[in-house]
Amino acid sequence: MYPRLVIDLKKLKSNLDAVAHITKDEGGCSLMIVTKGLCADKEMVHVVADHPAVDFVADSRVKNIRTYADEVREKGKKTVLLRIPMHDEAADVVRYVDLSFNSELSTIRLLDQEAGKLGVKHSVLLMIDLGDLREGIFYQNEELIFQTVEEILKMENIQLYGIGVNLTCYGAIIPKNDNLSNLTAIALKIEEKFGISLKMVSGGNSSSIYLVEKGELPEGINNLRLGESFLLGNDTAYGTKLPGTTGDALVLEAQIVELKEKPSLPIGEVGVDAFGQKPYYEDRGIIKRAIIAVGKQDTDIDSMEPVDDKIDILGGSSDHIILDVTKSDTEYKVGDVVRFTLGYGGMLKTATSAYVEKAYIR
Ligand SMILES: *Cc1c(COP(=O)(O)O)cnc(C)c1O
């Protein structure tokens, strides 16, 4: 059935080989693979959990992690929760998650209590904000960082596993040697002040991996967390393709339900479209317009690219996308399937939509 997301597990495996090589062999870092971009798809998780280079398997949602916690732990790897936990989920966090990212003492206290009830030790990574302005204690507020560490160290069931940073998400700030060096400096200060050693100094996501290749990852960063670079092969700092990866491990396929020659300009007074936006139309004269049975409910039309590069995406609404197939070398007809590679947004929505089937290439 269409629409469907075709997941090539062999290509995902070779993407994983490639990012593992950069991160571990060249970068000397431990490897955390992030599963949220594909909603923790089970077959993808098998590939990740089976890979000998993967040390941690992470997601932003406990609901995803609980589907694979047993498998990942059996294979000797740790589960990681990336999003700062809700108070409400503390009990589930200590059950399914080995290491959670945190920035709020009140939440860490709850994790301590729940870990005590369950009779486990829970590890936390304290997030430091280096200027991207999403989660973490602001790096210039060293007093708050030290106070928080001091309180964590008093807790009976919590281990301070390390510190970390997230960049290029909200503020689109690019990781560099100089901003990441602030993180390694803070790590050293914590270790000296409290006489402890931090196991992990986590230097970011798929936007940090390019620093390895440039030889600019600061000494002291010993972990990277990779989602998009593994799934789509992207270095997300500058939008380049990482060596040895491919961007077509995931392909969205949709079927043509109407194909007609019509004008390219709508006729009548222009108001707003189905999403309240004022559309822009280019006059291409009479064109061949194909409607495919997939829409904004299933994907992000700004984050998908036809494999046939002579097709243009004209627009869409909830359940339809309209394509200009005039220039294509293929004589499309109703019933034909059109294929698209995806960007991060397209991948995320496609994997989340209950209307998109999944198919696997093994
Ligand atoms: C989503 C996320 C990642 C992975 O990001 P990619 O750009 O997909 O590599 C890493 N760390 C945190 C905290 C995240 O939320």
Image: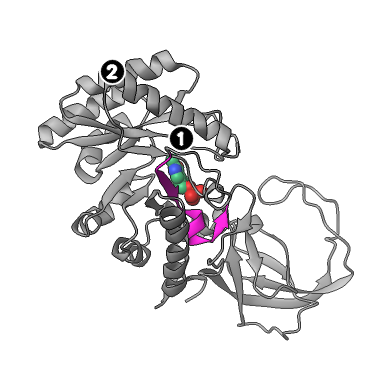
Q: Is 163 rendered above or below residue 53?
A: above
Q: Is 165 rendered above or below residue 266?
A: above
- Dot 2: few (<14), some (14–19), or many (≥20) neighbours within 10 Å? some
Q: Is 100 rendered above or below residue 250?
A: above
Q: Position of residue 13 (x, y in %)?
A: 41, 69
The residue carrying mark 2 has its beta carbon less than 8 Å from ligand 1: no
Callout 2 amino acid: Glu
Q: Is residue 329 visible?
A: yes
Q: Residue at x 11, y 37 (%)?
A: 118
Of 340 and 288, nearer the camera is 340
Residue denoted by label 1: 165
The stretch drawn in magenta includes residue 232: yes
Tell me the SS state at disc 1: loop
In terms of sequence position, does the residue under pointer 1 or pointer 2 come before the other? 2
Q: Is residue 85 visible?
A: no
Q: Residue at x 51, y 43 (%)?
A: 217
Give left or right: position of 310 versus 228: right
Q: Position of residue 127 (x, y in %)?
A: 40, 31
Q: Quadrant of the C terminus?
A: bottom left
Q: Is 359 rendered above or below residue 176?
A: below
**Tag of residue 150:** 2
Rendered image coloring scheme: one colour
Magenta segment, which residues? 221-235
**Tag of residue 291:** none
